[in-house]
Image: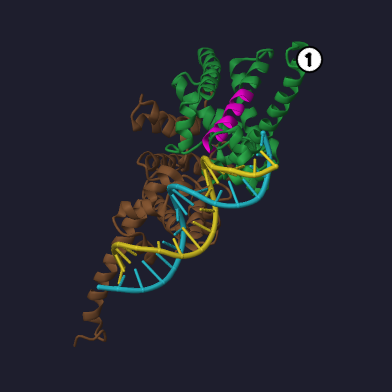
Chain colours: A brown, B green, C cyan, D yellow
Amino acid sequence: MPTAATPTAAAPKRSFREQMHIAREDAIVSAVNRLLAEKGFEAMTVDEVAAEVGIAKASLYKHFPSKEDLAAAAMVRVMNRALDFLATRDAVEASPLEHLRAVARWTMEVQLAGEMPSLPSENSTLRAALATNKDYVDGLMAVSDRLGEWILAAQAAGAINPALPPIAVLYTLYARACDPVLGFLKGSGQMDNAQIVDLVLSTCFDGLRAR
Amino acid sequence: MPTAATPTAAAPKRSFREQMHIAREDAIVSAVNRLLAEKGFEAMTVDEVAAEVGIAKASLYKHFPSKEDLAAAAMVRVMNRALDFLATRDAVEASPLEHLRAVARWTMEVQLAGEMPSLPSENSTLRAALATNKDYVDGLMAVSDRLGEWILAAQAAGAINPALPPIAVLYTLYARACDPVLGFLKGSGQMDNAQIVDLVLSTCFDGLRAR
DNA sequence: GTCTATAAAGCGATAGAC
DNA sequence: GTCTATCGCTTTATAGAC
């Protein structure tokens, strides 16, 4: 019975093709992710993406209808990875402040690994595409909600400065994920990644002033 | 004596023309400055600059030989404005920490005014142009030296965390001049500029943690 | 120095064979 | 779905008249 009517026979075949398809798309999204982190959306070209993946540019457009969708897919994946990381923290016994520090540390490590896309400038075409991308917006909301809980709890416990509006704390954490200070210090060639992360974490949570 | 041989007669005429020339170039650089702040180097087009200034694109290229030189001129002007501001602080009776706070506040106000160019991504063609631009490099060094003195003095006085390498403090101040948190908070529409600056200054110097 | 007009190159996106 | 080849447009930069 070679027809597709038998689920037990058709499912594996379809699944295999789908897995190949997913694997290919994952390779594409990975390349886009790296290029977005390295040079940003405007400077990244679709030809570069195709060259890095090792396929023709036209093939890219069979998977993603536009450059914006290509980049949006990478942003969605980053957001999902963040959600995955947040989920791992649920099993950890720690204070809200410690959770927030752990998240900030994770984002900085992702950035030093060259896998944190730099945020698109305010009037980029990518911004509009992201704003109407349900997967991205949902992921962003989910991350923000989770972080918001920890922020409120940390402020209630007196660990985070209660005078700061929670939204300001949230935005600060997002901004530090792309903090160019990491690249500056890396470029100075005087420290290793662990030292850089510790330093920037310190300035973020403890400030420049002595305590 | 209408010839150019008489210095007293020739000098004013040349000076007038030069002033016109300088005024025109200043208008160009101002437009470039705003566009660099608004959308960054890659997304800014020379056509936009010409349209904003109100002259033909070819005329721009009589003043500046390339888009990179155009942008570099704007960056040099920002650097010189920073030097001017630093000079005004010499007349102010204040501690090194207060000087650093004042500088950070000034950069944030410039950014909220839409006049702080976003820093070029790491492998932008603008980076290479800036690295070989003597005026820019000299200005950057002068600013860094001046800030470096205050940083060292503030650390010696125990006002800035002495555990932080001075270079990390310097880079943090540079990064906060372009901090996207200002734009985020502005976009939330919940605060005025003064509140935003105070908030970000607080997180920069005092950190997120309660004191 | 300013303009109009255009060259030269790069880009996102598509056509059509296989 | 992948490829080669190309379209159509934008962009940087220049030529040449005035």
Q: At x 48% / y 52%, what residue is drawn? A: A143
Magenta residues: mostly which secondary structure?
helix
Q: Amino acid at mark 1?
A: Ala
Residue at the outermost left position? A1
* Residue A166 visible at all: no
Q: Is residue A30 magenta?
A: no
Q: Position of residue A119 (x, y in %)?
A: 50, 46
Left/right placement of residue A129 relative to residue A5 reads right
Q: In the rendered structure, the residue with mark 1 lies on which chain?
A: B
Q: Nearer the viewer, residue B7 or B70?
A: B7
Q: Is residue B76 magenta?
A: yes
Q: At x 31% / y 56%, what residue is drawn? A: A27
Q: Label 1 neighbourhood size at 10 Å, few (<14), some (14-19), many (20+)?
A: few
Q: Position of residue B162 (x, y in %)?
A: 47, 18
Q: Nearer the viewer, residue B41 or B48?
A: B48
Q: At x 62% / y 15%, what residue is drawn? A: B95
Residue at the outermost right position? B1
Q: Position of residue B71 (x, y in %)?
A: 56, 35
The number of numbered badges drawn on the structure is 1
Point out the stretch of residues depicted in magenta: B67-82
Left/right placement of residue B191 relative to residue A200 reads right
Which residue is under mark 1? B9
In the rendered image, the quadrant that contains the N terminus of chain A is: bottom left
* Residue B18 visible at all: yes
